[in-house]
Image (cartoon, rainbow, N blue to C red):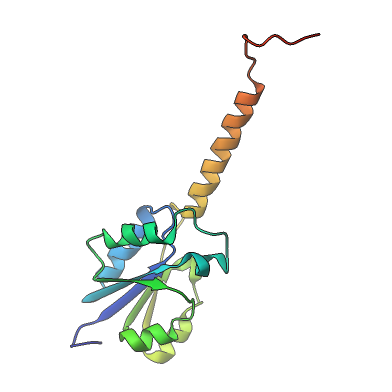
Amino acid sequence: MYNNKIVVYTSGTFDMFHSNHLKMIKYARGLGDTLIVGVSTDELVSSYKRPPVIPFEERLAIIEALKYPDVIIPQRSLDHTEAVKKLNIDVFVVGDDWTGKYDYLTELGVTVFYFPYGDGVSSTKIKEEVLKNYRDLKSKVEMRVNPDVKVKD
């Protein structure tokens, strides 16, 4: 708490920004007075999965353009102990695909919410669908006969 205001923190990669990202940020906004949003750096994301499609600076700009966050910061670590202490964080919100990962923050007096993403949209699903559509289209193009090309016998 800072100046009798509840400080909420949420973070993510926010690659290929979609409706579930927005829902989680909006949800986090409703849990307190000040909302800090951390955007994972390319280096951090690359340390545990494939690099983001959208570069860090662009992902940061997208989050900065939203009306819900009060403060946007780079997220350089998955360990939030120092951020909780330095930023006086009271509430931590993260997608439920990370369930259990941040329970250690409760020992620091932080309330942790795992936001239910459900079976909806995800950046991973979007990437998989784009790749599938690309491969399907490429296959159709490669199989198509071009009447202008004469094949020699």
Query: Foreground: 54 or 137?
Result: 54
Residue at (63, 19) in percent of width and height = 144
| 150, above or below 70, in the image | above
Q: Specify whether residue 114 is in view.
A: no
Query: Foreground: 137 or 53?
Result: 53
Residue at (70, 9) in percent of width and height = 150
| 83, above or below 143, in the image | below
Q: Quadrant of residue 15?
A: bottom left
Left or right: residue 140 versus residue 119 is right
- Image coordinates of residue 26 in percent, x first then y, are 28, 63
Q: Quadrant of residue 51?
A: bottom right
| 20, above or below 71, in the image | above
Residue at (52, 42) in percent of width and height = 130
Residue at (58, 68) in percent of width and height = 48
- Considering every residue shown, the one lying at the far left of the view is 3
- Image coordinates of residue 84 in percent, x first then y, are 37, 85
- Image coordinates of residue 102 in percent, x first then y, are 47, 79
